[in-house]
Amino acid sequence: DLVIKVVADVPKQANVGKGAGGRAGSNATEPTPGQDGCRRKAIFAFQRVDDGEHFVLCFGMYVHEYGPGGSQQHIGRIYVECVDSVPLYGLERGEERQALLSGIVLSYFDYARSMGFRYAHVHVPPPTDENSHIFASRSLVVRLRASLHLAYWYKRLLVTARQNNIIMGYEVGQTGNMPNFPLSMLSPSELTAELAFRNADPRVLDQQTQRLMERVSQLQDRFFVICLQPTNSSIQLTPDTSPILPSSVAADRGEFVGVCVSQRLRFATLQQAKYATMVLVHRMTAEQQARLAAGAPGSLGAGGGG
């Protein structure tokens, strides 16, 4: 069994707190609409384990949805900042996890299309970026292999989406050579990471890592522009009436990683994942209950934030 929840939904310009691992709500200011009309959402999936006795956090995705009120360059676009999952546990097979993750992402694209978004943008983070994760940092060699795998997975995913009429088509390319992929959607740190990757010197690496770096450097398909709607008609966005859902834990990916590091929460084993999930859910739920008690909308409980 799987439960998928939007655990945070905030305007991109909102103050979601500074400093990893701060107390829940310690920096809480009631958010106001972002200047660029963008809502940033954290979508987590929880998988049932131990014959249904526990749920563990198994998947995370951060998206930016550019609705009305922003610049013409961004309106009607979504940007998938990061997709990540925890390791396989127990008897779970790789193909089962792949099918699970593919279903979640395809369902999100279908939702975005139904809301009137025209384009979705995804990219394979540069392997030199040490901060491109949600659940656990990885060595350079692992990030290099993950880059190759992710590029292949995205292509396979989009072929499936096209065959099932979830999307109308897609184009691929490299950073800087895709006019329909506004680099202004990337954060300054992401742009810095792209520049660092472009200028990386593979000669300082061992031979095996050099070969992997060369393969990733030659990838022609690290950036994807996905067409969700016909391009010959005006953008008709359905208003997003779901309540703003702040979270000092999950609203910002860097904050979430910081909380996990400061609290020593890990997902390497099933036992670690159960404990980390319990701590994180308790903290997020307590924060939402405090907001509800104060009269603010939004909840992680049944029917809220989903």
Image (cartoon, rainbow, N blue to C red):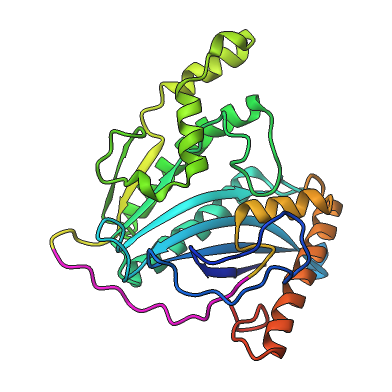
Q: Quadrant of the C terminus?
A: bottom right
Q: Give the range drawn in magenta.
A: 233-246
The one of 48 and 125 positioned closer to us in this rendering: 125
Taking the spot 64% from the left edge, 29% from the top edge, the residue there is 142
Of residues 283 and 103, the one nearer the viewer is 283
Image position, residue 175 (x, y; %): 36, 34
Residue in view at x 62 percent, y 44 percent: 133
Residue 26, relative to residue 150: is it above or below?
A: below
**Which quadrant of the view contains residue 228?**
bottom left
Dominant SS of magenta comes to loop
- Res. 266 in view: no
Is residue 250 visible in this depiction of the protein? yes
Image quarter of the N terminus? bottom right
Give how far across and how far down residue 287 sits, in percent: 73, 76
Left or right of residue 108, residue 69 in this image? left
Verify whether residue 259 appears in magenta: no
| Residue drawn where x is 60% and y is 82% of the image | 298
